[in-house]
Image (spheres, rainbow, N blue to C red):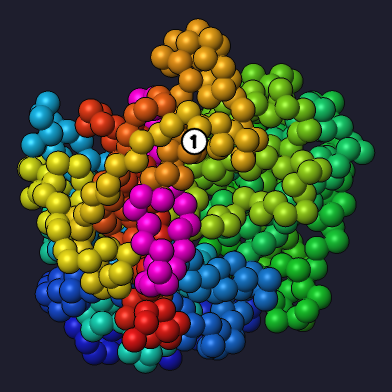
Amino acid sequence: MKLQSYAAGRWYEAPSGFVEVKSAVDGRTIAEVSSAGLDFGAMARYARETGGSALRALTFHRRATLLKDLATYLNERKEIFYERSYDTGATKRDHAFDIDGGIATLFAYSSMARRALPDECFALDGDIEALGKKGTFVARHIMTSLHGVAVFINAYNFPCWGMLEKLAPAFVAGVPCIVKPATASAYVTHAIFKAIVESQILPEGSAQLIAGGTGDLFDHLGSQDVVSFTGSLSTSLRLRNHPVVAEKAVRFVAERDSLNAAILGPDAAPGTPEFDLFVRELVREMTTKAGQKCTAIRRALVPRAFYGAAAAAIAEKLRAVTIGDPRLENVRMGALVGLAEREAVRANVDLLEMETKVLFGDARRVEVVGADAEHGAFMSPVLLGCELPLEATKVHEVEAFGPVATLMAYDTLADAVEIVRRGGGSLAASIFTYDAQAANALILGIGSYHGRIISIDRDDAGEQTGHGSPLPSLVHGGPGRAGGSEELGGIRGVFHYMQRTAIQGSPTRLASLLRAWSRGAAEVAKDGHPFRHRYEELEVGETIHTAARTITLDDIEHFARFTGDRFYAHMDEEAAKANPFFPGRVAHGYLLLSFAAGLFVEPAPGPVLANYGLDNLRFFKPVSPGDAIDVRLTVKQKSPRKPEYGEVRWDVEITNQNGETVASYELLTMNATELGVSQAALLPA
Ligand code: NAP
């Protein structure tokens, strides 16, 4: 099958230059790949002009909803993708990471975006900051979508997840993409991409596919574009050093080699649960996806005294691993993605063997079940041993991207930390200890070298998720050698495709631009109490000022009796006076909140469905018996939740008779929309 690219709204088949891609399992040719003749400049323009403008016209919530629709569509077809994916050597268990994991990432980004981002085309980042004493000039950061194209260059090991984990944040950010999968597994990405096009869910131009090389694409990139690369250190260096990337300051993020470590603590002797967990985790990491996982454990550190026992226990488990046709239920480990990739792993094992001993396996001999060992890219797991890792270099530099790990002995925790750091920055590390001091020393010692650290012990053994990235909201990426992209993950991943800009102006200008009210901005007066207004009718800035209420000593005593809160500051004049904050007995803070509600609430059934919390509550000034309080209630921000209701954030300020603020907070309510009101018959006709 000749894989076509999807460029400028149509499928394109190259006339020549095909590279054959063979099944990892039986070596038959299953795809031919070429991008010869593609007009890469036209693809970049099409993305920016057609895809970008369509995406930027949608709000975050709309984009997130499309992403969820797409996830649902792909989820219904995943058996088709599994079928293709077996030929990469992946087992059904491996599909859970790549295919199910990729689709789950779309769902996760969709709900994260609807929760964390407004129903707008821009996002706020951080709070308002006053720039002058009088508060007439303020600043706030906003994020707006880049007007460029995101180019995704992916590694072969995650043909589905690799594409979708990049597509999701860029799509939410409103940036179109061009996907370039690795040739060796491009047929899996192609099948998923084909389904994406067929679904017609994404706006035209928001995603294009290159089957084959990137040609002169980089020559057409500019300062609004982003390159997200996953692959080897050497390719990443070549691409990062492209003159256009440097000259036009093209955003470039790389996720690349990583010599991830697992560390067995000094307390975790053979026989402890942590020892067993360490052995099980290492074997799992070596054999899942035949070790072709960016987060797989490459260096396994154990106290010198446990080195022999650990080697024996790991070897015993590796011996039980069945290798062969990934479609077979009893096969635990399939093949590497191709013969060339297996050769690269073998060559790296040769390099590592210069400083290590083979403790288990043979990179050039393997027994397989149900498959042809001649033509398939099968390989035995290989456990290497290094007793003096501080004197070795290759074990900290060479990544054999397959079922290969090196067991290392360490003497002290400080040595263990130093050995891990020699990897130069990694995606993930795990520590196996039940000793709090050892865990703290390790985590703080290696923290700055990692994107994620997983502490595994008997308490979390049942739920721990291992080295893989369990949630897209967590950091994915790592410092230094791992690519330097530790910032990515969650909403930060979305913001990577956006520009942060400080907007400075009057509070009123910012409130109208950002649809977020802040103190000092003009108040909006409307007819009727805001609690009578439906979600759509409420206007940001809409404000009421209540009447005043005088607080008496009787109120305070009644409140104390009623609630049982007899704290001395409310009940004992002498003790209260002795306190540096109070002039004498003062009202309870909670009494003020309750009275404030009594002042601003409009009690009849109406669009306000529920009060679901307060944010940023502060008490600024004590209220003494005889003081009078009144309240300002202002609509600060609105966010839709469901067709029937939305969230309203109110700015509430309680003031005393001298105009001094005694307390302020943000009140959150759920308010019915017109639909919600009619469904619940909340307003009298
Ligand atoms: P690779 O050889 O560097 O290739 C990665 C991607 O770059 C492929 O799509 C490849 O396309 C493309 N590419 C190669 N040369 C290019 C060029 N001159 N211009 C444009 N694109 C180019 O890496 P790989 O062997 O596929 O993947 C294995 C590596 O990926 C391992 O080292 C692993 O550690 C790393 N990895 C890292 C992470 C992470 O998150 N840190 C995740 C997964 C994998 P072709 O296939 O068409 O050559």
Which SS class for mark 1? helix
- Placement of 280 over or under 384, stated as above or below: below
Q: The magenta stretch spans which residues?
A: 598-623
| Up-down relation of residue 284 to residue 52 (above or below) | above
- In this rendering, position of residue 419 left or right of residue 15: right
Q: Quadrant of the N terminus?
A: bottom left
Who is closer to the viewer here, 659 or 306? 659
Q: Residue at x 75, y 47 (%)?
A: 460
| Snapshot quadrant of residue 615 | top left
Give the side of residue 222 with respect to residue 36, left or right.
left
Q: Is residue 128 above or below residue 188?
A: above
Question: Residue at left 80%, top 63%?
Answer: 321
In the current view of this chain or complex, which residue is farthest to the top? 578
Q: Would you identify the image quadrant in which residue 64 lies? A: bottom left
Crowd around label 1: few <14 · some 14–19 · many ≥20 (10 Å): some
Quickly name the residue at label 1: 555
Residue 559 visible to an observer of this rendering: yes
Q: Residue lying furthest right in this view?
A: 271
Q: Look at the picture and state if 524 lies above or below 456.
A: below
